[in-house]
Structure formats: C-alpha cells, structure tokens
Image (cartoon, rainbow, N blue to C red):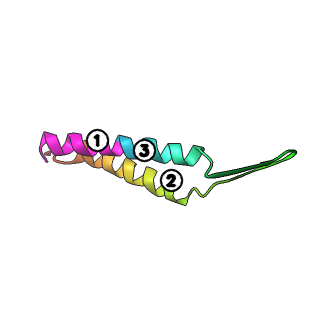
Amino acid sequence: MNKTVKMILLVVGIGLIGYGIYTLISPEASVDLGVVQAEVQDNNNAYITIGLGLASVVLSMLGGKKA
C-alpha cells in the first residue's frame, strides 16, 4: 500500500473509534419525571463502529510491510 492509502485508513480508523466511543457514552433517550429518571442506550452499533475503527488502524499499520 502506498502512504496515501495508509494515511486515509489511519484517519478514518481514528474517526470511527472516536465516534463509536461517543455513541457508547452518550444516551439515546432520556426521560425525567421529577423523582424518576430513565436513560436508554442501545450500544450494539457502537461496538461495531469501534471494531471497524480498530481494524482500519491495524490495517494502516500492517499493510504493505515487506519481510
């Protein structure tokens, strides 16, 4: 792989990891009824996004190295 593709994979991977962590932490829905508070999260897509980001970063580091 040339340096441009490696750099693109690295930047996209870091972006995906950041977005995945943000969606993992932030609640999707929040309800406040005085005494009762409820927050709902669905983290399945966040885990997939983080995994794709990690795979992209690893590919950018390993891709094209010669033995």
Question: The disc labelled 1 sits on which kind of residue?
Answer: Leu
Q: Which residue is farthest front?
A: 33
Residue at 61 percent across and 52 percent down: it is 28
Magenta-highlighted stretch: main secondary structure?
A: helix
* Residue 12 appears left or right of 29: left
Numbered badge on residue 10: 1
Question: The disc labelled 3 sits on which kind of residue?
Answer: Ile
Instruction: Judge by depth and name the residue closer to the eye, 5 or 40.
Output: 40
**Few, some or many C-alpha atoms within 10 Å of disc 1 (few <14, some 14-19, many ≥20)?**
many
Q: Which residues are magenta?
A: 1-13
- Which sits earlier in the primary sequence, circle 2 or circle 1? 1
Numbered badge on residue 17: 3
Mark pair 2, 1: CA separation: 19 Å
* Residue 28 appears left or right of 8: right
- Which sits earlier in the primary sequence, circle 3 or circle 2? 3
- The percent position of residue 27, horizontal first and vertical second, equals 63, 48
* Residue 31 appears left or right of 16: right
Numbered badge on residue 46: 2
